[in-house]
Amino acid sequence: MIDHDRLFEELLKTFFVEFVELFLPEVYAYLEPDSVVFLDKEIFIDVTSGESYEVDLVAKARVRGQESFFLIHVEHQAQPQTEFGRRLFRYFARLFEEHGLPVYPVVIYDKPRRPEPSTFRIGFPDRVVLEFNYRVIQLNRLHWRDFLRHQNPVAAALMAKMQMKPEERKRVKLECLRLIATLKLDRARMHLISGFVDTYLKLNAAEEKWFKAELKKLDPTTQKEVMEIVTSWMEEGIKKGLQQGRQEGRQEGGADVILRLLTRRFGALSPRTQKKIRHLSIAQLEELSEALLDFSSLKDLTARLRENA
């Protein structure tokens, strides 16, 4: 199971200033970038429903050129929820009460196409008593092409969640990785973004074939850098599967990962080939995992399996 909230939290914590610069340029204008610190997660109990809620992300920052501070509260929502504005206001009130600082609330939605509310109101026929406004970012209402020219790691990652046609998925993935390659990030941060992209844009065999063909059309330097990115998350996926296999005293975890990667690169494997891979030892799977990154066709796989027979 994919922990979507954790993925978003890790991305935003690593590139929080870049997120503000991209989506909240008005805030970026008065935010002191070096002052950002993240507060511990807070859990609020809804006494009416008896449920507990954990605030996603709260950052404390200083106003540029001043000694005053404020909070930025970011909530990630995959789907709209009834009474969400009311819940967000309760978070706002609790955070303001506890920290005594102004709170800038932000909601990031994944999937809804319809415009989501950005205001929670309490009113009477003669007047509005409360009007609580919050910032709404709806990724599925943003088009990926509009972010192609942004030299921003958050743009490179979140294009994978933006509006696109089904036939554009492979193009979006290529453009995401091309953008990542131009950012010149360290390996850890590059791997975080590329892993995020690969999580939400997994290609089938036909898409992978197109992807590799288009990759060869890039200039040699960019092509090399993109291939290093692709190789890094392939290696990480294999390593995790093999590690799980060792911990559980079996080889299936690593075999499953290798089979998925081979299927994505070369299409469906024959039952006989799958059986051979599943019968490899963990040590043999580790050797195969290193070799498969250099395979250019299924003939290379067949030759390798013959060596292990």
Image: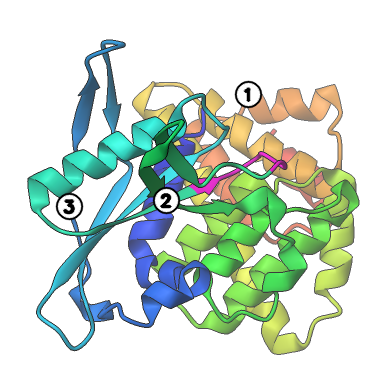
Q: Which amino acid is tagged 1? A: His
Label 2 or label 1, whichever comes before in sequence order: 2
User: Could you say where residue 4 lies in the image, as x and y percent from the top left?
Assistant: 49, 38
Q: Is residue 286 above or below residue 149?
A: above
Q: Is residue 241 rendered to the left or right of residue 56?
A: right
Per the picture, the main secondary structure of the magenta-coloured stretch is loop
CA gap, disc 2 and disc 1: 59 Å
Q: Which color scheme did the rendering employ for the protein?
A: rainbow
CA gap, disc 3 and disc 2: 22 Å
Q: Nearer the viewer, residue 205 or 14?
A: 14
Q: Is residue 257 rendered to the left or right of residue 282?
A: right
Q: Are marks 3 and 2 in contact (CB under 8 Å)?
A: no
- Point 73% across, 22% down: residue: 275
Q: Which amino acid is tagged 2? A: Asn
User: Could you say where residue 34 lies in the image, as x and y percent from the top left?
Assistant: 22, 79
- The numbered dot on residue 279 is 1
Q: In front of the other: label 2 or label 1? A: 2
**Residue position for label 2:** 133
Q: Nearer the viewer, residue 268 or 25?
A: 25
Label 1 or label 3, whichever comes before in sequence order: 3
**Element at badge 3?**
loop
Residue 72 in magenta? no
Q: In front of the other: label 3 or label 2? A: 2
**Residue position for label 3:** 39
Label 3 crowd bin: few (<14), some (14–19), many (20+), radius 10 Å: few
Label 3 or label 2, whichever comes before in sequence order: 3
Q: Is residue 164 rendered to the left or right of residue 98?
A: right
